[in-house]
Image (tube, grey):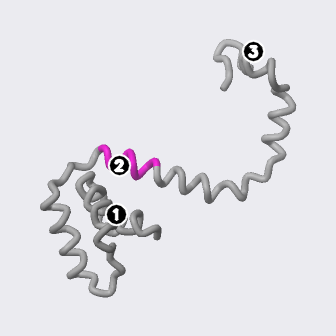
């Protein structure tokens, strides 16, 4: 972070690190390997923000959604009984069925 008035880092940082050296390290770092990991973080964050804006569902609605999904996707890999509670929680929070299942099952 930079100080708005000076455009430089604060004393707490510069007392421990050389800001110019750190800038050079950041500029020289190969960021291409970090991009997929960072994109995954951004995707999770965007889903979290979107879920805050979705209407919440009842448990009965969540069960109906999962049942309808299972009927409409007979070849889909569905969560085991212990995993269903996590899927129901995601559905109640407003997540769509496919994303809730994928998140719980690690896909």
Chain-order first, disc 3 or disc 1: 3
Q: Does residue 46 show up magenta in the picture?
A: yes
Judging by the rendered image, the residue that carries numbered circle 3 is: 11
Task: Judge the density around disc 2: few (<14), some (14-19), many (≥20) Cα neighbours within 10 Å.
Answer: few
Residue at 29% over, 66% down: 84
Q: Secondary structure at mark 1?
A: helix
Judging by the rendered image, the residue that carries numbered circle 2 is: 50
Above or below 80: residue 94: above
Report x, y in % for residue 33: 71, 58
Q: Secondary structure at mark 3?
A: helix
Q: Which residues are magenta?
A: 45-52
Judging by the rendered image, the residue that carries numbered circle 1 is: 100
Residue at 74% over, 22% down: 13
Contact check, label 3 and label 1, Cβ < 8 Å: no
Q: In the image, is 85 to the left or to the right of 35? A: left
Chain-order first, disc 2 or disc 1: 2
Q: Quadrant of the N terminus?
A: top right
Residue at 32% over, 87% down: 75
Q: CA distance from mark 2 to mark 1?
A: 14 Å
């Amino acid at each position: 972070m930079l100080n708005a008035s000076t455009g430089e880092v604060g004393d707490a940082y510069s007392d421990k690190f050389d800001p110019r050296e750190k800038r050079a390290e950041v500029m020289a770092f190969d960021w291409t390997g970090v991009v997929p990991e960072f994109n995954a973080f951004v995707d999770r964050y965007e889903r979290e923000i979107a879920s805050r804006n979705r209407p919440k569902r009842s448990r009965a609605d969540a069960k109906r959604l999962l049942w309808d999904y299972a009927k409409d996707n007979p070849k889909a890999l569905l969560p085991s009984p212990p995993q269903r509670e996590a899927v129901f929680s995601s559905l109640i929070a407003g997540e769509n069925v496919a994303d809730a299942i994928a998140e719980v099952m690690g896909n």
